[in-house]
Image (spheres, rainbow, N blue to C red):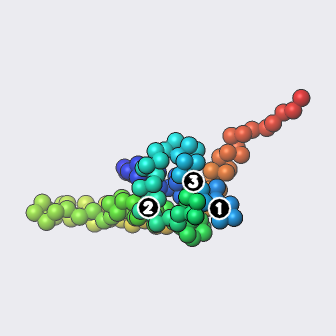
């Protein structure tokens, strides 16, 4: 499965915003860019599509709680082809292509949609926090 950089950057940006917006304070594009090593211009374009709310002095905040934003919502907003049903063009439609679509691609897409509906930006935050705490290891003081 190929996912565009647009989708990947959108998920990274929203997760970063969710983690760093405190008490409604906006998260700047430059801070997201430096933490996630992403282009500022590209982030601006993506955040405009995602309809994130721009803060008073710049930066962005989530308009909904992170636990209500599913990965499917983000993916569908940034690239409708990722979780779309497979349809062959009518002129090249053959019975075997129809069977492959109905027996393989469409059920697989349905599974992916359900899977992406089950993961939220909040889940991504928790996984990241767990990863950070696991990689830090014990601290020894002398």
- In the image, taking residue 34 as reference, residue 108 lies left or right, namely left
Disc 1, disc 2: CB below 8 Å? no
The spot of residue 40 in percent (x, y) is 47, 47
Disc 1, disc 3: CB below 8 Å? no
Which is more N-terminal, label 2 or label 1? 1
How far apart are labels 1 and 2 at the CA level?
A: 18 Å
**Considering only vertical position in the picture, is 24 above or below 37?**
below
Which is more N-terminal, label 2 or label 3? 3
Residue that numbered label 3 is attached to: 28
Residue 12 visible within the image: yes
- In the image, taking residue 20 as reference, residue 40 lies left or right, namely left
The one of 106 and 27 positioned closer to us in this rendering = 27
Q: Secondary structure at mark 2?
A: helix
Q: Determine the image quadrant of residue 132.
A: top right
Q: Write the residue at 71% across / 46% down.
A: 133
How far apart are labels 1 and 3 at the CA level?
A: 10 Å
Residue that numbered label 1 is attached to: 25
């Amino acid at each position: 499965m190929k996912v565009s950089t647009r989708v990947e950057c959108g998920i990274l940006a929203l997760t970063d915003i969710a983690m760093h917006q405190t008490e409604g304070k906006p998260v700047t594009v430059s801070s997201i860019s430096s933490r996630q090593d992403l282009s500022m211009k590209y982030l601006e374009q993506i955040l405009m599509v995602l309809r994130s709310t721009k803060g008073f002095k710049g930066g962005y905040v989530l308009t909904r709680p992170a636990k209500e934003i599913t990965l499917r919502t983000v993916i569908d907003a940034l690239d409708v082809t990722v979780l779309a049903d497979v349809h062959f063009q009518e002129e090249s439609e053959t019975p075997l292509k129809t069977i492959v679509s109905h027996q393989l691609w469409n059920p697989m897409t349905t599974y992916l949609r359900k899977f992406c509906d089950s993961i939220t930006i909040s889940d991504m935050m928790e996984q990241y926090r767990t990863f950070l705490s696991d990689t830090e290891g014990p601290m020894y003081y002398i």
